[in-house]
Image (spheres, helix red, strand yellow):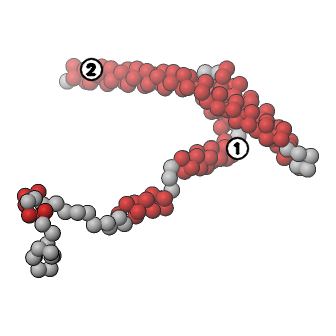
Amino acid sequence: MEPQSANGQSLGSEVMADAKSVGASVANRLHSEVDSRKGTAAAQVNALSSALEQTAGGLDDTAPAWLKSALDQGVTKIQSLATTLEQKDSRELVNEISNFARQSPGTFLLACGAAGFAAARLFKAGTPSSTQQSASSTEQSADTTPQPMVDATNWQDSTVATNQFEGEPI
């Protein structure tokens, strides 16, 4: 009986080692994918920062001071985010996000909710609304124009116009 339990233990440890290896390779692949795409994300964040900066600069003197201040602070934070994205790799970013979530979970959850709301609005804006889709399908199904019917088996008789009620030539 001992040889079977030894084989079972070695098989179990081999499966565990394989699982860890696969997990590590998946994590490495994921991190390399994120690292390859973070340049695009940083460029988009920089574009957002520039747009906010132009908005803040375009405000006239009648705009409230708190609005200008909020836009300027937003620009500073967004530029900081873009710099962080450009300079750090994905593992460092994950560690920073984890630390932030541990230090201030309420703010982290609020930020996640805001990001989810923004993503939902973006996805909703990118797809046609259900009323537009149902209107276009109604327009397609409402086309009741009669189509001419051609009897391919009796094409010679179709050259003579007939009275539909009596079947006699007109």
Using the image, tell me which numbered label, if any, was put on residue 2. none
The residue to which callout 1 is attached is: 107
Identify the secondary structure beneath mark 2.
helix
Residue nearest the viewer, comparing 28 with 17: 28
Q: Can residue 99 be seen?
A: no
Residue 3 picture quarter: top left
Q: Quadrant of the N terminus?
A: top left
Q: Position of residue 157 (x, y in %)?
A: 8, 64
Q: Is residue 33 above or below residue 142?
A: above
Residue nearest the viewer, comparing 56 with 15: 56
Q: Going by the image, does 44 lie left or right of 64? A: left
Residue 12 picture quarter: top left
Q: Position of residue 19 (x, y in %)?
A: 38, 25
Q: Position of residue 163 (x, y in %)?
A: 15, 76
The residue to which callout 2 is attached is: 6
Which label's residue is closer to the chain start, 1 or 2?
Answer: 2
**Identity of the residue drawn at 74% across and 33% down:** 50
Q: Position of residue 95 (x, y in %)?
A: 62, 27
Q: Can residue 144 be seen?
A: yes
Identify the amino acid type marked 1: Thr
Q: Going by the image, does 8 lie left or right of 137? A: left
